[in-house]
Structures are given as C-alpha cells and as structure tokens.
Image: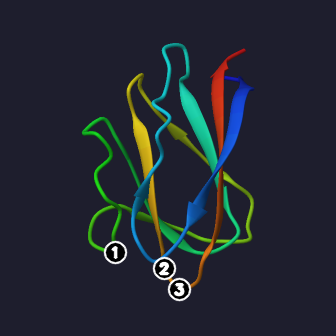
Amino acid sequence: MAHRPFFNYTQAVGAASVTNARVTPVGVRAIRLASTTACWVTIDDNGGTPASATVGFLLNGGVDGEIFGVCAGDQVSVIQASAAGTLSICEMTNA
C-alpha cells in the first residue's frame, strides 16, 4: 500500500529519554523515522514509554529512514545510543 507524507517534524536525540508532545492523529497509518545518530526508539500509546536499550528498538543513524505502522494516539520516545543528534519523523497517510 502506498503512503504519502502528511506532516513532518523533528525531535532532539540526547542522553535522556524524550517523548514527543505530538500525538499521532486519526488518519495517520505509518511514520518514517530517520536519525542523524544511532538511537533507541519506542512507539506506543502509553503516554510515551521512555526509550532505553532494554525498552525499544535500535534505529541506526545516517541511513535511509524506516517505516513503521502506527495507530491514532501513539507517541514516539527516543534516547541516544552513543551521541546526540536529531530524529526526523514523517507522518504518512494512505494514498
């Protein structure tokens, strides 16, 4: 299924887990994540479970973005794996 970009924003990646204030809106079916640095990420609807090396998945930095399915109400949390950087988040809807 094809997706089209809906809304783009960035989130700082640092030594402390940060949950983005933006909540995935109704109609968004996927997000594309790309980071300038390796980071641990969580995507959930529990008010943003803090990301860590034991909770979440590792997103490699400096490579093409990855696409993940999401539901309305999901939030993204992120923490650096080794160095600070920026996480780019692109919300996508069905084409």
Which residue is painted at 59% across and 62% down in the image?
12
Disc 3/disc 2 C-alpha distance (Å): 4 Å
How many numbered marks have been drawn onto this rendered protein structure? 3
Circle 1/circle 2 CB separation < 8 Å: yes
| In this rendering, position of residue 72 left or right of residue 27 | left
Per the rendering, the mark at residue 81 is 2
Mark closest to the chain's N terminus, 3 or 1: 1
Figure coloring: rainbow
Circle 3/circle 1 CB separation < 8 Å: no
Closest to the observer, 71 or 8 = 8
- Whether 23 is drawn above or below 14: the answer is above
- Whether 18 is drawn above or below 91: the answer is below
Circle 3/circle 2 CB separation < 8 Å: yes
- Whether 85 is drawn above or below 1: the answer is below
Residue type pointed to by label 2? Ala
Which residue is painted at 28% across and 64% down in the image?
55
Disc 3/disc 1 C-alpha distance (Å): 11 Å
Residue 77's spot in the image, x, y percent? 42, 53
Q: Secondary structure at mark 2?
A: loop
Disc 3 designates what residue?
82
Mark closest to the chain's N terminus, 1 or 2: 1
| Local crowd size for mark 1, using a 10 Å CA cut-off: few (<14), some (14–19), many (≥20) | few
- Whether 78 is drawn above or below 67: the answer is below
Q: Secondary structure at mark 3?
A: loop
Q: Secondary structure at mark 1?
A: loop
Residue 25's spot in the image, x, y percent? 50, 20
Which residue is painted at 39% across and 33% down in the image?
74
Disc 1/disc 2 C-alpha distance (Å): 8 Å
If the image is split into quadrants, where does the C terminus sit?
Answer: top right
Residue type pointed to by label 1? Ala
Disc 1 designates what residue?
53
Residue 27 occupies quadrant = top right
